[in-house]
Amino acid sequence: MDSINYLAEAVYFFQKFISCVNNDGPLKLSTQAFRELKINESIYKATMRILVVNNMIDFDGKCYVMTSEHSKNHKCILEDLDSKNQIKKYEALYTRTVDESGFFFDRISDLEYEIYSRCNFSVTYERGKEIAGYLDLTNKTILELGGNSGGLGAAFLSRYEDCSYFILDTRIPCEIGNEFKELYGTEVTFIEGNVFEMEVPSQNYDYILMMNLLHDFDDERCCEILKNCFKYCSPHTKFVIIEDILTNEYEPKEVILHGLRLSIECMGGKQRTIEEFKEMFSGINYTLEEVIRLNEIHTMLVICSWLPADTRV
């Protein structure tokens, strides 16, 4: 999906928001308006971020403000959608925001999940070659959560042959991963399961790695994932979290554009700023040690845990 469609989604959602607000005079929406609108916070924030960075609305530090010029621009986009008979598509997307019946990967078919997993390998393999230079995995044991078909692990093992690499994911990506493992001869161990009921070999891992995983979930579920890791940590375990992290609430970067779809498809998933990550980590005894900007999209966070001895294996 290109940036124009992302912007059109945000404009449509915004119009749905303001249709629920009694407005006298210039339109202003507070940062907490989602509570009155009965809309998920992550969907509201993602919508407003997209509009702010595209100069479709202003933010004065407390409220979102819409000028007459903004209103004209919104109208042009909506009229264009109407002329192309696309309004029903956006209505269906908005309706999905209140549908809590399924997470993205639960709604797609097995064939779609297989195609996704096959494509994921080459993408994450190339990204892994870039990331490997930032970590010393010599003779280390790594557990990757949600590692899909293993592209990242294959890239790391091509550089650090003596490390042990485990991936926890669901059935289909593990099946595709084992197929690629035979094809490319990589020594990745795939474990079928899920991150909320973690059952992996009982040992302490040097690194627990997550790439593009936490943005699929709200804060509560992210903390649940991280707490599940406690029993597999030693005092020296480091967590490596690679995400499309926002370094500024309204940074004018392409990375911000897919945040709305992420929040819809993943039932509360969201992009986060570094400050939001810090706040989440501090509540469960995790400390942010290092921030490494990998490229225009991804940032790597290196996290240390401070855990009581009885939480470890």
Image (spheres, rainbow, N blue to C red):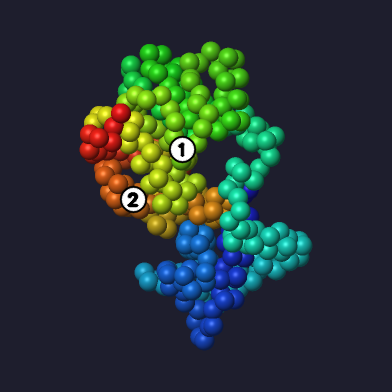
Q: Between marks 1 and 2, how big is the CA–CA gap?
A: 21 Å
Q: Position of residue 265 (x, y in %)?
A: 58, 51
Percent x, y of residue 187: 48, 15
Q: Which residue is mark 1?
A: 197
Corner quadrant of residue 73: bottom right
At label 1, counting other C-alpha atoms closer than 10 Å, the crowd grade (few under 14, some 14-19, many 20 or more) is few
Tell me: 301 left or right of 27: left
Q: Is residue 112 left or right of residue 30?
A: right
Location of residue 180 in the rendering, given as x and y in whole percent from the top left corner: 58, 20
Q: Is residue 301 above or below residue 2?
A: above
Circle 1: residue type = Glu
At x 25%, y 35%, the residue is 310
Quadrant holding the C terminus = top left
Q: Is residue 13 above or below residue 146?
A: below
Q: Are marks 1 and 2 in contact (CB under 8 Å)?
A: no
Q: Residue at x 35, y 53 (%)?
A: 276
Q: In terms of depth relative to the viewer, which is nearer, 42 or 55?
A: 42
Amino acid at circle 2: Met
Badge 1 marks a residue whose secondary structure is loop
- Disc with the residue nearer the chain's start (1 vs 2): 1
Q: Position of residue 248 (x, y in %)?
A: 38, 54
Q: Which mark lies nearer to you, 1 or 2?
A: 1
- Depth check: give the residue in front, 109 or 91: 109
Viewer-nearest residue: 79 or 91: 91
Task: State left or right for residue 53 relative to residue 90.
Answer: left
**Disc marking residue 280:** 2
Residue 249 image-quadrant placement:
bottom left
Q: Which mark is residue 79?
A: none
